[in-house]
């Protein structure tokens, strides 16, 4: 067992990472050691990252114990960069965390100053001055590279800055100079946000925290009103909305809803969250209340501004969309399913089930712009997996079945149509996949079936018969 992390007091005692626990306890018998829990540490870091969304939506992970925040265009909302950094560190301190931070024009320099320097806000003209006295480990290099540089007498970043570049590249490869240029701001280093960035966002910072369902819905509608002009400017409507609730103690709750048609009207948006809150509010612990409420548009589509006719032919469609939105918001998007055609002539692949919310918006456009191709009659109920028919008496070689036994019942065929031959898709099923001959048959009791033969008579193996569906 080895030490993986130390607090400041342990560092002052001279303990170090990767030191054996037995050795450390021999030096200090009263040493307190807690077993590492990487999963719990990750959950804690994710919770802190959620809390940091109040400052910027561009939050990325930095290893196991750090975060990158891209605050471009956000600092003025908090009184400047110094005020923002002070607010972040002060709030984290009062929540029980010992955090260090730095703001600069490059992630590499901020990383170096927060972990090896004094932190703070670093201006562009101060980059070389503040970076030079830091150890080479501040360049985010591998341990072997750091040790090799120290053996050559290059212990500080300033030693590497002024050293010839060509010998360094030949000796250590391109990573050393890449990390150096990233820290100096000469090489771009993008920050990859941990969450998708909302296309539009609006928020309300409350003077007094709120906690009841009615208060949350009232503020949500107010925020939706401020979001409406941005949607109108884009001639778009929101399809997926996210409500983010920032609790006073730092806990963050996220509630998402979707719409089958693009929405921009505040009362409709608030109505979706009303249905959703009724389903999940009991699982939300308001605690001492929420101090920030943010409404994100995660997905938007063009908004159809055409006026409906006076006869009200679209009222049914509007009512259906509203019904789908309300039920999906209350019970989840997967509670209502519809069928969607696929580009495949194999029956079980030609249609898939998708949430009605995803299919409703495109159904009208598909029907208008690309009429469905003609298809042979298909059964009302199509089995997901064709069922083997036990025994079949049929005309040889390609005739329809005369008598068959299926699900322990024998059926005498009175009428039949076919065959309809469907070849399998060789790029999926392989070149040796056998074709199918489908028949529509009706027994003497009037029951209609869709049955097919796989294979042909006269081959080495007799063909097999399968039931694929039943008609009404």
Image: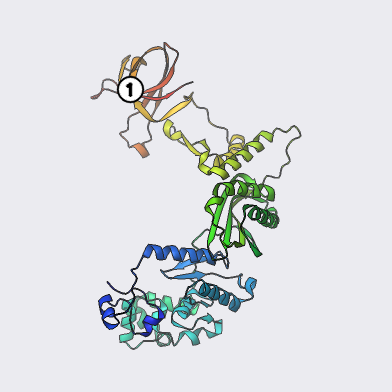
Q: Nearer the viewer, residue 154 or 324?
A: 324
Residue 454 lies, in percent from the top left, at: 33, 26
Q: Please tell me in which quadrant of the rendered image residue 202 appears.
A: bottom right
Residue 238 lies, in percent from the top left, at: 62, 50
Q: Nearer the viewer, residue 292 or 289?
A: 289
Query: Which residue matches tag 1?
Result: 389
Give the residue at the far left of this rendering.
460
At 47% from the left edge and 73% from the top edge, which residue is drawn?
97
Q: Please tell me in which quadrant of the rendered image residue 137 appears.
A: bottom left
Give the residue at the far front of this rendering.
30
Q: Secondary structure at mark 1?
A: loop
Residue 397 lies, in percent from the top left, at: 31, 17
Inspect this view and state whether residue 314 appears.
Answer: no
Crowd tier of the residue under label 1, counting other residues whose Cα lies within 10 Å: few below 14, some 14–19, many 20 or above = some
What kind of colouring is applied to the model shown?
rainbow
Residue 1 lies, in percent from the top left, at: 27, 71
Q: Nearer the viewer, residue 37 or 193?
A: 37
At 48% from the left edge and 63% from the top edge, which residue is drawn?
47
Instruction: Look at the picture and state if 405 lies above or below 31.
Output: above
Inspect this view and state whether residue 95 appears.
Answer: yes
At 56% from the left edge and 51% from the top edge, which residue is drawn?
281
Instruction: Look at the picture and state if 195 lies above or below 181.
Output: above
């Amino acid at each position: 067992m080895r030490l993986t992390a130390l607090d400041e007091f342990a560092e002052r005692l001279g303990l170090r990472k990767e030191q054996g626990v037995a050795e450390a306890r021999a030096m200090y018998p009263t040493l307190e050691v807690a077993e590492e829990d990487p999963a719990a540490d990750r959950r804690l870091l994710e919770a802190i990252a959620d809390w940091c969304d109040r400052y910027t939506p561009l939050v990325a992970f930095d290893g196991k114990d750090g975060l990158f925040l891209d605050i471009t265009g956000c600092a003025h909302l908090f009184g400047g960069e110094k005020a923002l950094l002070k607010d972040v560190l002060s709030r984290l301190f009062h929540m029980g965390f010992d955090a260090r931070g730095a703001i600069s024009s490059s992630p590499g320099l901020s990383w170096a100053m927060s972990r090896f320097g004094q932190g703070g806000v670093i201006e562009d003209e101060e980059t070389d001055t503040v970076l030079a006295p830091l150890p080479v480990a501040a360049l985010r290099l591998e341990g072997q590279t750091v040790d090799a540089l120290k053996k050559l007498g290059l212990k500080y970043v300033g030693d590497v800055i002024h050293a010839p570049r060509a010998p360094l590249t030949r000796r250590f490869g391109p990573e050393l100079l890449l990390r150096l240029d990233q820290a100096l701001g000469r090489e771009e280093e993008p920050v990859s946000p941990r969450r998708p960035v909302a296309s539009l966002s609006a928020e309300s910072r409350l003077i007094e925290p709120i906690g009841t369902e009615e208060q949350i819905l009232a503020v949500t509608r107010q925020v939706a009103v401020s979001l409406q002009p941005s949607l109108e400017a884009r001639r778009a409507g929101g399809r997926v909305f996210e409500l983010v609730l920032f609790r006073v103690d730092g806990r963050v709750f996220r509630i998402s809803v979707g719409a089958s048609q693009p929405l921009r009207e505040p009362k409709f948006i608030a109505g979706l969250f009303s249905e959703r809150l009724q389903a999940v509010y009991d699982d939300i612990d308001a605690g001492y209340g929420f101090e920030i409420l943010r409404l994100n548009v995660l997905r938007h589509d063009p908004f159809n501004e055409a006026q409906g006719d006076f006869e009200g032919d679209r009222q049914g469609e509007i009512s259906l969309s509203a019904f789908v939105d309300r039920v999906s918001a209350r019970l989840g998007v997967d509670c209502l399913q519809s069928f969607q055609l696929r580009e495949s002539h194999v029956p079980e692949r030609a249609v898939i089930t998708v949430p009605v919310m995803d299919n409703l918006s495109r159904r009208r456009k598909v029907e208008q712009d690309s009429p469905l191709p003609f298809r042979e009659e298909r059964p009302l109920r199509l089995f997901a997996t064709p069922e083997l028919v036990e025994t079949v008496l049929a005309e040889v070689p390609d005739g329809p079945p005369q008598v068959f036994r299926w699900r322990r019942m024998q059926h005498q065929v009175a009428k039949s149509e076919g065959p309809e031959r469907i070849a399998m898709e060789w790029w999926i099923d392989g070149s040796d996949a056998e074709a199918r001959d489908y028949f529509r048959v009706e027994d003497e009791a009037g029951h209609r079936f869709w049955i097919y033969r796989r294979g042909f008579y006269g081959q080495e193996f007799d063909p097999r018969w399968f039931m694929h569906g039943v008609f009404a």
